[in-house]
Image (cartoon, rainbow, N blue to C red):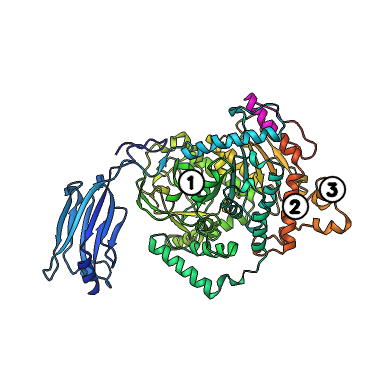
Amino acid sequence: MGKLRSGILDGKNSRDVCCLEVQVDINESRKYLKEGKNLVLTVPESHERIQKTTEDTDTFYFHCVKAWEPVLKIRLQKVSDKEDEDSNLSDTLTVPLKFLPVGYKVKITLPVRNNVPLYLYLQLNDCTEKLDVRLGYDLCREEQEFLLKRKRVVASALKRVLHLERDLHGHEVPVIAVMATGGGLRAMSAMFGHLIALQKLNLLDCVTYVTGASGSTWTLADLYEHADWSQKSLEGPLKAVKEQVTKCKLNLMSIEHLKYYHKELAERAKAGHVSSFTTLWSLVQEMFLHERPRKYKLTDQRKALEHGQNPLPFYSVLNVKEEKFSTFRFREWAEFSPYEVAIPKYGASIPSEYFDSEFFMGRRVKKLPESRICYLEGLWTNIFTRNLLDGLYWSSNSNEFWERWAKDMVDIEKHSPEEDITVIKPPSCLSGKLYEMFQDIMTKRPLLGKSHNFLRGLEFHKDYIRQRKFIEWKDSVLDAFPNNLTPLQKYLCLIDVGYFINTSGAGLFKPERNVDVIISLDYGLGNVFKQLEMTYKYCKIQKIPFPKVDISKEEEMNPKECYVFSDAEDPRAPIVIHFPLVNDTFKEFKEPGVKRSLSEMEEGKVNLNNSCSPYYLIRLIYSSENFDKLVNLSTYNILNNKDLLLQTIRSAVERRRSSRTWNLPSYSRAGYR
């Protein structure tokens, strides 16, 4: 095939791939199966490697790289025996594929010990040169078309909201994004309040992108089930969410539900999906949030984008190693949208409906039906794949972690690919088997969630780490070692972003999206600036344009409702409007400018203390009163900072108009940083 045109990959990495089709007489196969024997087909160099006959399968496919000179081996063996030569009931027939004519069916005979021949039909076909994996860093065609439609909606909304005298030209329309953190039910509930407030201010139509992670993905998944959700009142969806959040969930593990889970898991495994604890978690979570199975899929959300009527959603996760490495030593950002699933680091993406099908050398070699969205939500909120090293990192001071991580990144630059990097330093007394045991205990992810790797088989050119686009995403100790990166893994291991930085904004940092304003919605308890500060430090190390987050000790102790951060010296950096989850003036005001009466003061008491809050992460049920308080607080905090929001958006419009470095005016309440 021709060369792969990518900033990283070239013709050395894309090989001529062929597909061997093997047909077996189904009646002969069933006869042997009744006798406790089956046919074993092996192509060691292929993607599939080993396949065996079953009651209902008569055709088998093997995808191979021609240059590897693959060989087909066929033998009949007892079903109960292990795969070794002693269990063979026939001689092993070996067929080098290079001797098969391409495109023609060939009949072969397998000699059986009782001299009864078994006939098989082989046909070798060249695979198409067209790849099913899209390689390149540009936005996909569907997103580009969406942006043209959405820009018209945003331009019209901005003219109304900002009371502009004339229509905005295309280049004057800023890209505004909503970026939400995770936080379980707390994030899900509070995000509804934030979106309701943005809708009341007519600002939802000004937003181009909205991103979620962990708990906030539940909000987005609920809303995008409806094609016109942002054009209608959100009170209806909010009422449905409240009903679920405040309802007892003791029946989740009833006999009836357990039977349903078992049936679903068995059907997915039979179809070829990877079974894991995360799959079970996905089903339990679906019942927890909706009490019923939903046929709804991620690609169904495309209906909500057909006319640019809603922002484009992105769901953020991390891809990590199954073992040997903590999340801090190796992780890669991954993003899901209704259009594509992508790992930006490699400039590789696939249509969303292809996710979890099997891929080899950029081709989809086993097509699986698109999963229901509940299975994706299970990955996006995959809280069960932490290893002990992750826990140790987070139990230490986060500032020490960032200093250590930054030093690691500097050390990587000093090493050549041939040099070794010590990933884990066990106690000095450990060596040999004891060292291996220590490493396994510390890094093994016991409740792993696996998905078929759509990058499998793609190889990298020896100079790939010098490619500019790759370097923008290069942030792990393995990036100097191509043989240890994701394309050589059979599975992806996708986990909640909260095990690194609780932010959904990685997709917004992609320069091709050219984001001007980020409305940051933080649902953390305790230090309400921690995740944004970590995001800034990460971007600084990665040389990604992002404004400095500088918070005084006094502000950390007594945070306000809203902060704006900008970088006047770098016009590429977005303006960040940060809304932490705090209870400031809401204690005394039920609406902006409307004070509470004495009888209403109780409604303003929202306990956000990290240790004893009713919104603590592991709480699975909220009282009706606490749910209302959280939603009302979130709504109020946005509404009470209407002027700051509008002022910042107006500044972004002016920056677009002038295309020059600009200065933000001061604002008396929160101030600019």
Residue range highlighted in magenta: 650-663
Q: Nearer the viewer, residue 98 or 501?
A: 98
Residue 57 on image: x %, y %: 28, 63
Q: Amino acid at mark 1?
A: Val
Asked which secondary structure carries label 2, the reply is helix
Pointers 1 and 2 in contact (C-beta within 8 Å):
no
Asked which secondary structure carries label 1, the reply is loop
Q: Which residue is mark 3?
A: 594
Q: For mark 2, does the 10 Å Cα neighbourhood hold few (<14), some (14 to 19), or many (20 or more) residues?
A: many
Q: Is residue 520 above or below residue 40?
A: above
Q: Amino acid at mark 3?
A: Val
Residue 359 on image: x %, y %: 37, 50
Q: Which mark is residue 477?
A: 1
Q: Quadrant of the C terminus?
A: top right
> Of discs 3 and 1, which sits in the foreground?
3
Q: Which mark is residue 633?
A: 2
Residue 77, by quadrant, is bottom left
Residue 641 on image: x %, y %: 75, 42
Q: Amino acid at mark 2?
A: Leu
- Labels 1 and 2: the sequence-earlier one: 1
Q: For mark 3, does the 10 Å Cα neighbourhood hold few (<14), some (14 to 19), or many (20 or more) residues?
A: few
Looking at the image, residue 304 sits to the left or right of residue 626; the answer is: left
Looking at this view, name the residue that lies furthest to the right.
598
Asked which secondary structure carries label 3, the reply is strand
> Residue at 58% of width from left, 62% of height from top?
290
Verify whether residue 420 appears in magenta. no
Pointers 2 and 3 in contact (C-beta within 8 Å):
no
- Labels 3 and 1: the sequence-earlier one: 1
Q: For mark 1, does the 10 Å Cα neighbourhood hold few (<14), some (14 to 19), or many (20 or more) residues?
A: many
Residue 499 on image: x %, y %: 57, 53
